[in-house]
Image: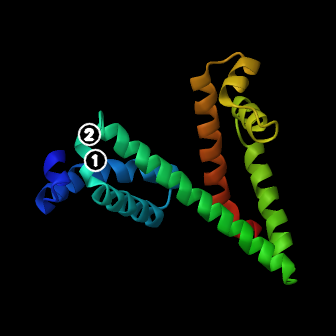
Amino acid sequence: MLKQVALGAPGAFAELFRAYHQPLAEYVHRLTESLEMTEDIVQDVFIKLWMKREMLPELDSFVHYLFILCRNHTFNCLRQTANSRVRQLQWASQFGQETAAPADDDYRELINVAITQLPPQQQKVYFLSRHQHLKHKEIADRMGISIETAKKHMKLALRSITQYVRAHINIWL
């Protein structure tokens, strides 16, 4: 099928799309928790695939390539979204909009409350990662746990914090 896609066969590309759209969307949605962002990212990934279709038959593992491409594009989009938020706050503070700083402080306080709700191991992993800037391996060594356990605690902590903030954001701001 990849050879047909590389030759530009629209039917083959449509088949590829049907086969991988849903698994990619589920993967991206777990990372973004946003349906809109998920659809945009998955569409962008398929556009990139179409643009680079000639090299697809040369890949050792197409599925691995596809999910890595998807992961990297997701992280780039999340980074751009975060940078956009920072620029908005900087712009607001530069032009004297006093509501930006208190809202930002409220947001930080909301995150701090969310952190206190975490189980102790997740709190510790989160603290070591975000405040002491340790890598997963360093956290694992310091806590006497496996790297995978450190990663899992961090993933669960971030998910819990995100869910808490989403559930309480309107109450706080």
Identity, as a three-letter code, of the amino acid under mark 1: Met
34 left or right, relative to 60: right
Query: Where 56 sits versus 151, above or below?
Result: below
Where is residue 167 shown, x and y percent of the image?
A: 63, 60
Query: Where 43 sits versus 71, above or below?
Result: below
CA gap, disc 2 to disc 1? 6 Å
Q: Is residue 144 visible?
A: yes
Q: Is residue 99 visible?
A: no
Q: Which residue is at 50% across, 56% downward? A: 33
Residue 55: mark: 1
125 left or right, relative to 32: right
Depth order, front residue of 90/114: 90
Q: Which residue is at 49% across, 61% downward? A: 34
Identity, as a three-letter code, of the amino acid under mark 2: Glu
Where is residue 28 shown, x and y percent of the image?
A: 44, 51
Where is residue 88 shown, x and y percent of the image?
A: 72, 74
107 left or right, relative to 72: right
Q: Are marks 2 and 1 in contact (CB under 8 Å)?
A: yes
Q: Dot 1: within a 10 Å radius of its alpha carbon, few (fewer than 14), some, or many (20 or more) residues? A: few
In the picture of the structure, the residue carrying the numbered disc 2 is: 58
